[in-house]
Amino acid sequence: DAGVIQSPRHEVTEMGQEVTLRCKPISGHNSLFWYRQTMMRGLELLIYFNNNVPIDDSGMPEDRFSAKMPNASFSTLKIQPSEPRDSAVYFCASSFRGRYGYTFGSGTRLTVV
Amino acid sequence: KQEVTQIPAALSVPEGENLVLNCSFTDSAIYNLQWFRQDPGKGLTSLLLIQSSQREQTSGRLNASLDKSSGRSTLYIAASQPGDSATYLCAEAQGGSEKLVFGKGTKLTVNP
């Protein structure tokens, strides 16, 4: 298995632009998570899906952030419009009901200038 | 609110030393606890997963324990090596929710 795959690895964009981050979970995993990591706040859960349905989006900071999971093998996290304070590393993770642990992708390092 | 605390924030030891990293959590309704390693600029690598029904897990030089009654977990690293230098994160999954709540991590430096 190739693990959790995220793209792009790095993204540099100008303030106000739309940014879309992508994630492919491990086949067979039914839960998918989006986390954001910053030096100040550490790892924060933004949103998680179970069987493609958003279960908890309480960590999504603002309406500028949205996430979708149209099928079991793909999810997107979109920021529109982006702001410099959105600069962080965004991780996607997947699990099978959390029972056997969580597998993380390599992350997307987002820089908004 | 779930909170996970890791102390110390940073630790520096000489090569060969045995060491313990600490993690405490506030909710006893824990589902499982997972230890991760993160190298600078990299993603998270899972080290050990302890289910709520277990007391400890071992992998090579690593041993993780779980004490639900005290709300604590420890990661023991035997005979530390410079290659063990990284940030170690613990994360708790609470029963009834699949959310994984992370501590801020302990940055470990093993000096040759």
Image (cartoon, coloured by chain):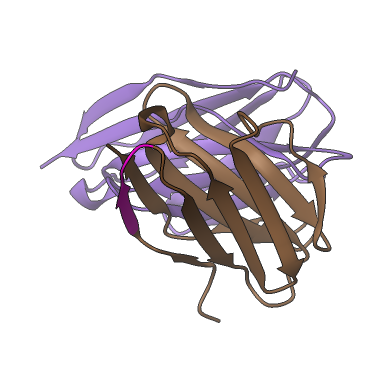
Q: Tell me, by letter, which chain the rendering colours brown.
A: A
Residue B40: name its quadrant.
top left
Residue B85: name its quadrant.
top left
Q: Is A66 on the left-hand or right-hand side of B108?
A: right
Q: Which residue lies furthest to the left in this view?
A: B112
Rendering coords of residue B39 (x, y %): 31, 48
Judged by its main secondary structure, the magenta piece is strand
Q: Is B33 on the left-hand or right-hand side of A15?
A: right
Q: How many labels does the image show?
A: 0
Q: Which of B10 and B39 is in front in this view?
A: B39
Q: Is A36 on the left-hand or right-hand side of A11?
A: right
Q: Is B70 on the left-hand or right-hand side of A65?
A: right
Of the 4 image quadrants, the one containing the C terminus of chain A is: top left
Rendering coords of residue A111 (x, y %): 31, 42
- Residue at 22% across, 30% down: B13
Q: Residue furthest bottom?
A: A1
Q: Does the magenta stretch include residue A30?
A: no
- Residue at 53% across, 72% down: A3
The tint of chain B in the picture is purple
Does the rendering let one see residue A43? Answer: yes
Q: Nearer the viewer, residue A74 or A12?
A: A12
Rendering coords of residue A79 (x, y %): 53, 44
Rendering coords of residue A12 (x, y %): 29, 49
Residue B90: name its quadrant.
top right
Q: Residue furthest front?
A: A16
Q: Nearer the viewer, residue A4 or A49?
A: A49
Of the 4 image quadrants, the one containing the N terminus of chain A is: bottom right
For the record, the magenta segment spans A10-15
- Residue at 60% across, 59% down: A76
Does the rendering let one see residue B65? Answer: no
